[in-house]
Amino acid sequence: MAAAGNADSARLLSPQLIHVACVCAGHNASRDVVTLVKSVLFHRRNPLHFHFITDTVANRILSSLFQSWMVPSVQVSFYDADELKSEVSWIPNKHYSGIYGLMKLTLTKALPSDLSKVIVLDTDITFATDIAELWGIFRKFTDKQVIGLVENQSDWYLGNLWKNHKPWPALGRGFNTGVILLYLERLRRIGWEQMWRLTAERELMSMLSTSLADQDIFNAFIKQNPVLVHQLPCFWNVQLSDHTRSEQCYTEVSDLKVIHWNSPKKLRVKNKHVEFFRNLYLTFLEYDGNLLRRELFGCPSQASPETVQLQAALEELDEDDQCYDFRRERLTVHRVHLYFLQYEYTPTEDDTDVTLVAQLSMDRLQMLEAICKHWEGPISLALYMSDAEAQQFLRYAQASEVLKNRKNVGYHIVYKEGQFYPVNLVRNVALKNANTPYVFLTDVDFLPMYGLYDYLSRKSVVQLDMAHTKKALVVPAFETLRYRLSFPKSKAELLSMLDMGTLYTFRYHVWPKGHAPTNYAKWRTATTPYKVEWEPDFEPYVVVRRDCPEYDQRFVGFGWNKVSHVMELDAQEYDLMVLPNAFMIHMPHAPSFDISKFRSSSSYRNCLNTLKDEFHQDLSRKYGSAALKYLTAQRNI
Amino acid sequence: MAAAGNADSARLLSPQLIHVACVCAGHNASRDVVTLVKSVLFHRRNPLHFHFITDTVANRILSSLFQSWMVPSVQVSFYDADELKSEVSWIPNKHYSGIYGLMKLTLTKALPSDLSKVIVLDTDITFATDIAELWGIFRKFTDKQVIGLVENQSDWYLGNLWKNHKPWPALGRGFNTGVILLYLERLRRIGWEQMWRLTAERELMSMLSTSLADQDIFNAFIKQNPVLVHQLPCFWNVQLSDHTRSEQCYTEVSDLKVIHWNSPKKLRVKNKHVEFFRNLYLTFLEYDGNLLRRELFGCPSQASPETVQLQAALEELDEDDQCYDFRRERLTVHRVHLYFLQYEYTPTEDDTDVTLVAQLSMDRLQMLEAICKHWEGPISLALYMSDAEAQQFLRYAQASEVLKNRKNVGYHIVYKEGQFYPVNLVRNVALKNANTPYVFLTDVDFLPMYGLYDYLSRKSVVQLDMAHTKKALVVPAFETLRYRLSFPKSKAELLSMLDMGTLYTFRYHVWPKGHAPTNYAKWRTATTPYKVEWEPDFEPYVVVRRDCPEYDQRFVGFGWNKVSHVMELDAQEYDLMVLPNAFMIHMPHAPSFDISKFRSSSSYRNCLNTLKDEFHQDLSRKYGSAALKYLTAQRNI
């Protein structure tokens, strides 16, 4: 405990648990709330407990995000907004936030009944100070006060904005509900649930609907019960809406603690000092969230079971092992933000749908539009990026006509960390988040033939009875070394380009083994699917059921990441069936950094061999003596 | 002025000017000091005046950096370390910081005589709080105290680290000089200059040399004059050296204000909480420095003449002009960090040396090694990057055997800002920082033929009397559409590859006009340089004197950036001479983002036309009626 320092900071530093509640629904709010959380974590010195009232989408995104973020001394709880809808759905509301804009009224009911105090925040809030300072204000409440709020910084509730403007009743300028100190225990005691309802019902008789959602009801309630409110200093909720009077706040105090982007225009709002505010916001928007995983000082955290397990695994590693770095990477938990952009997908009725599954990093972004043009079905993409790159990607996707019109693409961000490219981990994120019974496992630098989606989902999957048999359908792979390729419209055209030397079979020049077992000679004339046998180093692109084995995450960087997967498919006795009328073409690109980094390193190659051996041993252990053939095959090469 | 808020913070917020001094020499320290400055700027609320004692290298880097950074309410002064060397060069010193490690002793002499107080910082310091808090401690000095220091957090001065370890005399554990509050006015009054000299001379009789540079002398001085020192709380200089006892400091106070990376191992130092400290450091290392340009609140800044001029130019812009964004970009001042990596270049005696000049961004980094292998002469590269990317580049360059062994490459970072790629601004940074009489103006995706450097600098430049005539030597450009090119060793080999269709003349398929005037047919058989005439849209790669006109910075994004430059060369009556035995080859790459972003935009093309017209008008104004030919030529296409 702090003994030195001034008394005020010592008090703030006591490791008291601070509770924060937030209503969050949909993809966009789930992105916004991350920036809020980062700004809170950046300045905080106390353990925190976040309480999220979420719809299904936000729940899926935020629960996996926090699970993978592993921030010490941060707990997270979720509450189903759908279950709370009936509490507020009877209130007509014109605000753009919709029904979720009313949910803050239900917090005494939604949150655990033994929770006595909570700070409630909108998702468009940025903290510029330690949240413990705000929490400390609960101590300044008189015995009667139950709710802490900042005055509204617009003239809305004065009712003079336009002729016949008739706002809900409020005390003077009214209060803003973007930042609330909610004394839950006292609210329950005074019968808040009945009280706000009565207020709302009475006012709705004349007002017909709310304009500013919960804020109208809070204000009408306070007007009737002014002794219940504790007014917070204005800098705890500096409101950047249009016509804001917030300037009077911050020029007086020259100390901003909380910014509220409460204009639908958000960052584009007009304001003399908007550059200053935008900088604060951008600081956290692009801030590397991994840096927030730091331990709190003077505050021993109760480690989660995952953390304890991870710690134990890390301690088992031998720092002198020449493959230490590889094994260390394998244990790295990468932060994951699923469904980073808007996503909508309705399963097809016949249950034969196929998702294209791939992973990429920043340097392949320009492939996305082309892939979308070649594949109209659902796509699951995992993107390996830094926080700043994810924002760059967002801007790119929002500016692209092709991408912004496609809703059936799931974009999952895996945040960068460490020196290796954890390619199989990233692939698994894309694979696990496909929402169809079948997946086409491909790479981002390939373009599928036009119509491949239809061919697979309407024909092959049914014809080959994929639902009841263990099959991996091979899509033969070709490549071009030229930039300006006129993409073949048919198998016939492809074959003639092959004969002309405009196309080659994939990696024909450098690594023929990878695809030779596809048997391209046979494919030329094949009209029905044919079975081929597994061979060492075979790494075809396949269509399989989504419940296929995952990629082995020990293979990081480059080398053996697909080979090991196909080997495991074979070990599980998948039949490898080559599709006679399907093809895909690899488009040229400059070599990636990681490849050039490791191709030259002998220790990298040595470790890869060690990892291969260990993978073989694991296969034998899992699949018995039959799997020994992989080891033998390997040794013979 | 702050009226509200607690008294303590109100006091800190008074807009008092704070002075900071720092000794900085060489390329690496110049990089380090930027991270220190960022951490100070991030938390500060006061105007600051930085005083840098620099060698020539650091002066060049930091003066251009601050000039382009344009942070409001920040002044910068430079003092020549070379002029101060004689003050301390007589002191034998074993510390790795060399003679610069002693310069802090000379500050009373180096800094302006009317400067009364200054905070002195090492370059390996990171601030975690507002520096005004530290400045405020001057007020706690008794009348006698002249210097504020934190106790050393190692046992060094106790003299028990090893047998016969004999450190300089110190009070107990001694003091660390990484963070010093220096009361200059009082130091001058008590005769500090004579005092430290006498101390040093006396101790050197038995000690022979200093081990920890200035710190030994400060400590010996304090041991003799203990009443002069004001001991600062330990958290003002948490020292992360090996065997540090700093942990006792921060576990007690749980409030860290200044971190000092005073181990030669820097970030790799072993320490239980090193992750925490490293995160703090990385936060500022990769922080977007543009965000620190924000105005201070409650502190009207005295704008520099540059700022006033810029503000006026910005106000003249018409927001409704369809090319507003282009004109706005043109006025953006990009932060520039010259010589980001170690750089050494000795001019050749015959004054015929040629620098390869190019610009690039992250996605072309993989070209650097190849270019270095093809061109052994000096290179000036401007890199358009974010702060985070610059760090990625640094790691890449330090890991590359090829790059780290080349000292004659100047890497200049132009920091990203805005939505356009300011290609001509970036080119000009590379051009202006070439240190030879001649420059080869190329693009980063070209590889020069082997031996081009010798051919140009030893032969062409002399043969064509470049020193006394106005000439632009054209290096004919070719291209390959294939990745795996066996690079031609001679003109003969190149010609046969051209005949085979393995190579083409550059942009033969898409934009033949750009290079047609080179007259490739003539070049095939040419054995001596031949003159060609300028034609519209000609954009050859040329060798010119370094005093050639700069690129016109109004052309941002893609289009007309080189064309306008060659046009101006022609307007200045440069002779265009094609070199018979020189060539360069464009290597394939995926299309860049920016190109694909703008190719499709009609407003982009419209603005480009407007800008072209304005450029033509400017040419006529500058070069008279002769320049009308460009306008006519343009209209005829």
Image (cartoon, coloured by chain):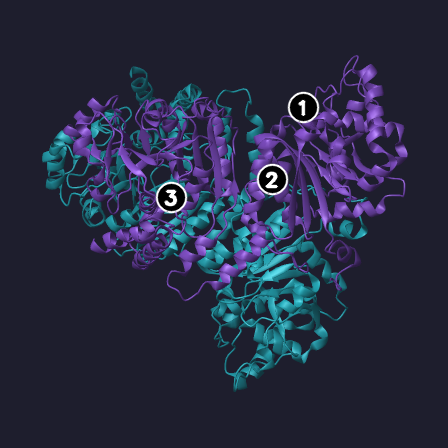
Chain colours: A purple, B cyan
Is residue B80 visible in this depiction of the protein? no
Q: Quadrant of the N terminus of chain B?
A: top right
Q: Which residue lies under the disc numbered 3?
A: B430
Q: Quadrant of residue A500?
A: top left
Among the two numbered marks 1 and 2 on one chain, the one whose residue lies closer to the N terminus:
2
Q: Which amino acid does label 3 sit on?
A: Ala
Badge 1 local density, few (<14 within 10 Å), some, or many (20+)? some
Tell me the residue at 47%/56% (across/down). B58
Q: Is residue A362 above or below residue A351?
A: below
Spatial separation of the CA atoms under disc 3 and disc 1 = 54 Å
Q: What residue type is labelled 2?
A: Thr
Left/right placement of residue A453 relative to residue B256 reads: left
B189, A163: nearer the viewer: A163
Tell me the residue at 69%/52% (across/down). A46
A156, B516: nearer the viewer: A156
Q: What residue type is labelled 1?
A: Gly
Query: What SS does tag 1 mark?
Result: helix
Q: Which residue lies under the disc numbered 2?
A: A35
Badge 2 local density, few (<14 within 10 Å), some, or many (20+)? many
The answer as to whether the residues below labels 3 and 1 share one chain is: no
Q: Which residue lies under the disc numbered 1?
A: A98
Give x and y (percent) for residue A479: 25, 34
Give x and y (percent) for residue B481: 23, 34
Tell me the residue at 75%/71% (across/down). B144
